[in-house]
Image (cartoon, rainbow, N blue to C red):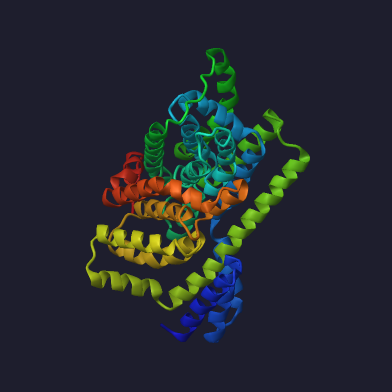
Amino acid sequence: MSTALIVLVVVLVSAMLLRMPIGFSMIASGIAYLLVKRQDVGLVAEQIGNGLYNSYVLLAVPLFVFAANIMNAGTVSERIFDFCRILVGRMRGGLAQVDILVSVIFSGMSGSAIADAAGPGLVTIKQMLKKPEYSRGFAGAVVVASATLGPIIPPSIPMVIYAMVSGASVGALFLGGVVPGFLMAALMMLVVHVIAVKRNMPREDKIPLRDWPAIIYRGALPLSMPIVLLGGIYSGAFTPTEAAAVAALHALVLAGVVYRALTWRSFWGVVMESTRGSAVITFILAGSFILNYAFTAEGVPQAMAAWVDSLGLTQIKFLLLVNLMFLVLGCFLDVSVLLLVFVPMLLPAAKLLGVDLVHFGVLVVLNMMIGLIHPPFGMLLFVTKALTGIPIGEMMKEGWPFLVMLLLLLLAMTCFPQIVLWLPQTMGYTGK
């Protein structure tokens, strides 16, 4: 390891420990690397500018962020919640089951775990805390676990970023997340059912049949968004990047025109919040470009590939090693650092072993989601605590069955790639 690379790592880690924003930490470490290498610091601007300019797919990120914020500001979450009460509210632990089903539907609109927890998740937590049978920890744990569905069921912001890093097909990645996403939801509902029966949790009041048409009508238009997005992508009507613009327009028309739930003041708040969120992501992306330049210049990805080759690992053993690495690093590092810094270093090794990039991408994103729900860096835990005041310790105590379930599913997806690849291959995907 060269002196310049050691300086880069030291500056990056030190800045993160000092709680400097991740994007600035990455850019600062990149500048330090160039100074030690006696290279033109202007390379920072060049790498960032070229990286952002040439990544057309990244246009989808701010548009999906905007669409999610529009839906959370309108009445979309409440309408979906009422619709799901008809379907699963009569099950034991009905409110928790409703939350999982709402997350499945909302995932097809937002692509963001944080948006899911802050929108529909907040609605269901408030409802659960009104009933003594639901503990605070259980309510928070269900919402935190179900929010991980957001980036697995398409569309998905992390999958868009992974596609930019790896060159994999966005459309194939979206299809690859469908079966794992529904398996996650089914297993979560099974966990809730077992706990609900054991604790004798209540069923929701039966909704009179005469009220069904009005509730279904209220929820029909929001439910149309996943159909429009995925139908448009796979029919060839628009690209995944253009689908993000369609999602933003669809959400804006619903919340602003059809439901009239947006005032100019609330719309301006959505614009500002979306701008802030997109700026944070863009700074992190900008930092990743200069870091990846440094790692490539130092030959780190090639060295990683040579090391993996020397171990004589099979595909399965390599993927198990990657899972273990991400699960450990997820305890200490932000998801964005794992996705934008470590994944590019592992891609040459994955290609060398013939690992399908769509399979690898979905595994990576699921690893990221598991990282969001376990301490000490579990972002979803902190978001939920900030919104509801539920202590993280209580959520973790109640959330371990969901974490175990996700780990078992991750193991199954690792050993049986067809769980991910069956649907993309059925729809014509052939490449690696």
**313 vs 111: above or below:** below
Residue at position x 73%, y 42% in the image: 267
In the foreground, 370 or 233: 370
Question: Quick one: which residue is furthest to the top in this view?
Answer: 210
Tell me where residue 201 sits by quadrant: top left
User: Residue 431 at what x, y percent from top left?
Assistant: 33, 51
User: Residue 272 at what x, y percent from top left?
Assistant: 71, 51
**Does any portion of residue 128 appear in the rendered image?**
yes
**360 vs 201: above or below:** below
Residue at position x 65%, y 50% in the image: 274
Quadrant of the image containing the C terminus: bottom left
**228 vs 296: above or below:** above
**Does any portion of residue 237 appear in the rendered image?**
no
Residue at position x 47%, y 66% in the image: 341
User: Residue 36 at what x, y percent from top left?
Assistant: 54, 86
Quadrant of the image containing the N terminus: bottom left
In the foreground, 375 or 200: 200
Q: Is residue 316 left or right of residue 122?
A: left
User: Residue 30 at what x, y percent from top left?
Assistant: 55, 75
Question: Quick one: which residue is furthest to the right in this view?
Answer: 265
**190 vs 294: above or below:** above
In the foreground, 84 or 157: 84
Tell me where residue 225 sits by quadrant: top right
Q: Is residue 193 left or right of residue 136?
A: left
In the foreground, 337 or 119: 119
- Count the marks: 0
